[in-house]
Amino acid sequence: MKNILILTYWSYKDALVQSYTLPYVKIINNQVSVDKVFLVTIEQPFHRMSDEEWNEECIKLRNENIELIRFKYDHFGFKMLFRMIGFIPQLTKLIRKENIHTIHSWCMTAGALGYILSVLTKKRLVIDSYEPHAEAMVENGTWNKSGFKFKLLFWLEKKQSKRAEAVIALTKEMRSYAKDKYNVTFNNFYVKPAMVNLNKFNVTEDSYMLNRKQYNVEDKVVCIYAGKLGGIYLEEEVFDFIKSAHQHWGEKLKVFLLTNKDKKEVDFFLKSKNIPMDCVDTKFVPYDEIHTYFSLSDFAINPVKPVPSKRYCTSIKDGEYWAAGLPVVIPQNISDDSAIIAENNVGYVLKNLNEDEYKNACLKIDELLKGDRVLLRDKIKSIAIKYRSFELAENIYKAVYS
């Protein structure tokens, strides 16, 4: 009997588990010769599940040989270290009792826990979605480079990189980053951008027209953004772009901001930028319902902060937008995505975050939308198939666990 322990640093209901982890867990479970996969989640208050909800999910996944485990969340730092003191012994016991063969960590924060468990149990360590986190937190202004959190996680990033038997990065450039920053070279290095369920986000002309009629946006140019504001994402700049878009399209513009940002904060930005309130519809939408809004949209924005570390990351949003056939406006040097958008002429890459570039983006989107919509949608979908199909992930996991 050989089992796998998968570690995340996210809540089970978080989209990062639902769309970014669970599909891969099921691929691993189906493609690799193991008896059971144990999936660890760290639950935040915002995504708190009742015991009844949790038990229902546990039963459902148990039928697929996936066992759910959850611990309480705290931001990475002193509090979380104290929590780890409590649940590291539990996981160590589980690893030994259940004959865990591999500790498979998702991203570098969970990888820190994976490193500790691997050292304690001498089990194989695999790091998935291998990307910088400590430096990213400094770049986006959340941490200070001289602070304890940065120093601790950066040290643990080095340690887990050196210990890992295999890493699955989001871009091939991460190999160079690891060599420069961690002084590590890899024998088993794989590249897997954030894949998406292409069928879930597939849009037909019929569904496009039907949903636009249902949401009363038949005569609108609809812009969509599904994600957070602030942190690793731009915030005020998003509203600067919306202002430019409203100046370009006027009353024809409709923006759906699918975010958990407090509506009062959004309204503050709208007022300060003189954007009409009815231009923007702000709401938090469960992940399972997001595809409906994608299906009625004309284009999307992905406001990732263009900091250096984002060259090594992949945004799942772009894959979902592409699967829905949407042109994307994005800052430059975001993963490989910015280059893909520019080279294929399926959106606009912002050279700077200023009014002139926002206007240029609107002109470009307008040009694309005035062409054959069906041809444009099919062209963008083909990009999703080429770069974000789950079949690519299947081959990588077969190699990692061969």
Image (cartoon, rainbow, N blue to C red):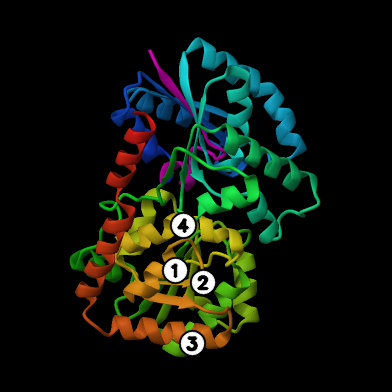
Q: Amino acid at mark 1?
A: Ser
Say whether residue 145 is left or right of residue 177.
right
Rendered image quadrant of residue 85: top right
Q: Amino acid at mark 2?
A: Pro
Residue assigned mark 1: 338
Of badges 3 and 4, the one in the foreground is 4
Magenta segment, which residues? 1-19
Answer few, some or many: residues within 10 Å of disc 4's Cα (few below 14, many 20 plus, some between 14 and 19): some
Asked if residue 132 shows in the view, the reply is no
State if disc 2 and disc 3 touch (CB < 8 Å).
no
Q: Position of residue 136 (x, y in %)?
A: 63, 55
Q: Position of residue 380 (x, y in %)?
A: 28, 67
Answer few, some or many: residues within 10 Å of disc 3's Cα (few below 14, many 20 plus, some between 14 and 19): some
- As helix, strand or loop, the secondary structure at mark 3 comes to helix
Rendered image quadrant of residue 383: bottom left
- As helix, strand or loop, the secondary structure at mark 4 comes to loop
